[in-house]
Image (tube, rainbow, N blue to C red):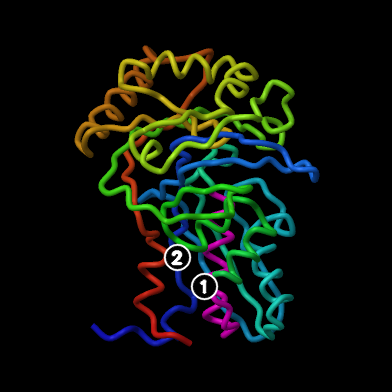
C-alpha cells in the first residue's frame, strides 16, 4: 500500500502510549543531583491521544483539556515550543490531549504526549531532525521522553536516555491505578531511597529479574498504596511502575488479564475491595515492542 501524503497528517489525532517500568534499579546519583538508573521500559497498547494541527502563524495553542495543568506548563506546549525554537520552524500548532493515563501514575503520560508532539510536528513543519536529535530534545523535557521518541521497548541506563531496544514479544498485564498522585521528585528526594543497586543483564531482566527501588519508599509514604499490594497478591506478583502509583501484574494471557480486571471491578463495585476509601481504576493491557505512534507515522510519506 502506498504511503499517505504528508497533508493527511495534519489536523489528526495521534496515539501517545503508556509505559511500564518492568523493574527499576537506582544505581547512583550524579553531582548535578540527577539519579542514574537501570530500567526495562515496556510500551503498552493503551494510552492518551494527542491532536496536532500545524498552523500558518507561529502561535502554539492548547485547547482546554480535562486535566489540571496550565497550558504554558503542559509538556505538549513546551515540546512544540522547544522544537520551534531549536529548528527555526516558522509555523505554529494547535494541540489538544485526550487524557486516559492518570497523572502521577508512573505510566509516562506527559512524556508520551510530548514525544508525540515532537515526532509529528517534526514532520509537519519539515524540520528534518533525525531520531537522535529528537530524542536529545526530548531529554530536555524529561528522562522518559526519549523512549517514546524512539518508539521501542528498551533497556535503559544513564538517567533513562541510553536505550537498547528489546523484543519482549506478546505480553499481558493487569494494571491497577489507585487515585493517588505521586510526585517523582518526592520519591527521588526521599532519604530512604536505595541508590546503590547493581545492574542486571538483559537476560535477567527479560526473565522477570530485578525490583523497583522506588516501591518501598512509595508504600511507606502512602499506606493505601501498600494495602493495594496486599489486595493484588492473590493475582500474582504485583509491582510498582516508575515512582507510582500504578501497579501491574504480568498475566499469562489477555483472557487471564481481563478476567482478573473484571473480578476487581466487580469487587470494587460491590464494596468488597475498598481500601481506606481509595478508589482505583483497573484494566487489562497488552505490551508492545513497537509504539503505535511510529506505526502510524510509517504510513505517511516523508515530508
Q: Which residues are magenta?
A: 109-131
At which x and y percent is residue 250?
32, 32
Q: Are marks 1 and 2 in contact (CB under 8 Å)?
A: yes
**Of 50 and 78, the residue lying toward us:** 78
Question: Is residue 246 rendered magenta in the image?
Answer: no
Q: CA distance from mark 1 to mark 2?
A: 8 Å
At which x and y percent is residue 127?
60, 82
Give residue 54's quadrant in the image. Answer: bottom right
Mark 2: which secondary structure? strand
According to the picture, the residue beneath numbered tag 1 turns out to be: 120
Q: Which SS type dominates the magenta stretch?
A: helix
Disc with the residue nearer the chain's start (1 vs 2):
2
Question: Is residue 111 rendered magenta in the image?
Answer: yes
According to the picture, the residue beneath numbered tag 2 turns out to be: 14
**Of 245 and 148, the residue lying toward us:** 148
At which x and y percent is residue 170?
25, 47
Quadrant showing the N terminus = bottom left
Mark 1: which secondary structure? helix
**Of 213 and 264, the residue lying toward us:** 213
Q: How many marks?
A: 2
Q: Residue at x 59, y 28 (%)?
A: 214
Amino acid at each position: 500500500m502506498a504511503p499517505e501524503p504528508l497533508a493527511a497528517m495534519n489536523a489528526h489525532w495521534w496515539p501517545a502510549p503508556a509505559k511500564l517500568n518492568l523493574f527499576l534499579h537506582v544505581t547512583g546519583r550524579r553531582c548535578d543531583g540527577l539519579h542514574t538508573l537501570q530500567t526495562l521500559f515496556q510500551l503498552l497498547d493503551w494510552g492518551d491521544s494527542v491532536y496536532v494541527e500545524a498552523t500558518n502563524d507561529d502561535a502554539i495553542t492548547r485547547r482546554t483539556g480535562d486535566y489540571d495543568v496550565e497550558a504554558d506548563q503542559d509538556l505538549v506546549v513546551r515540546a512544540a515550543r522547544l522544537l520551534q525554537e531549536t529548528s527555526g520552524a516558522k509555523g505554529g500548532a494547535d494541540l489538544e490531549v485526550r487524557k486516559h493515563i492518570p497523572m502521577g501514575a508512573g505510566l509516562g503520560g506527559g512524556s508520551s504526549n510530548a514525544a508525540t508532539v515532537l515526532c509529528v510536528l517534526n514532520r509537519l513543519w519539515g524540520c528534518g531532525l533525525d531520531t537522535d536529535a529528537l530524542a536529545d530534545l526530548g531529554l530536555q523535557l524529561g528522562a522518559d521522553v526519549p523512549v517514546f521518541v524512539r518508539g521501542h521497548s528498551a533497556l535503559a541506563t544513564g538517567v533513562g536516555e541510553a536505550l537498547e531496544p528489546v523484543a519482549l514479544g506478546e505480553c499481558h498485564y493487569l494494571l491497577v491505578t489507585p487515585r493517588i498522585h505521586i510526585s517523582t521528585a518526592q520519591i527521588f528526594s526521599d532519604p530512604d531511597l536505595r541508590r546503590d543497586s547493581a545492574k542486571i543483564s538483559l537476560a535477567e531482566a527479560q526473565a522477570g529479574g530485578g525490583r523497583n527501588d522506588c516501591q518501598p519508599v512509595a508504600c511507606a509514604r502512602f499506606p493505601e498504596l501498600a494495602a493495594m499490594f496486599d489486595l493484588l497478591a492473590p493475582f500474582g506478583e504485583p509491582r510498582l511502575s516508575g515512582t507510582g502509583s500504578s501497579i501491574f501484574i504480568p498475566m499469562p494471557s489477555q483472557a487471564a488479564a481481563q478476567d482478573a480486571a473484571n473480578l476487581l471491578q466487580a469487587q470494587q463495585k460491590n464494596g468488597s475491595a475498598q481500601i481506606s476509601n481509595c478508589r482505583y481504576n483497573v484494566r487489562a493491557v497488552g505490551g508492545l515492542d513497537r509504539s503505535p505512534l511510529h506505526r502510524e507515522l510509517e504510513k505517511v510519506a516523508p515530508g
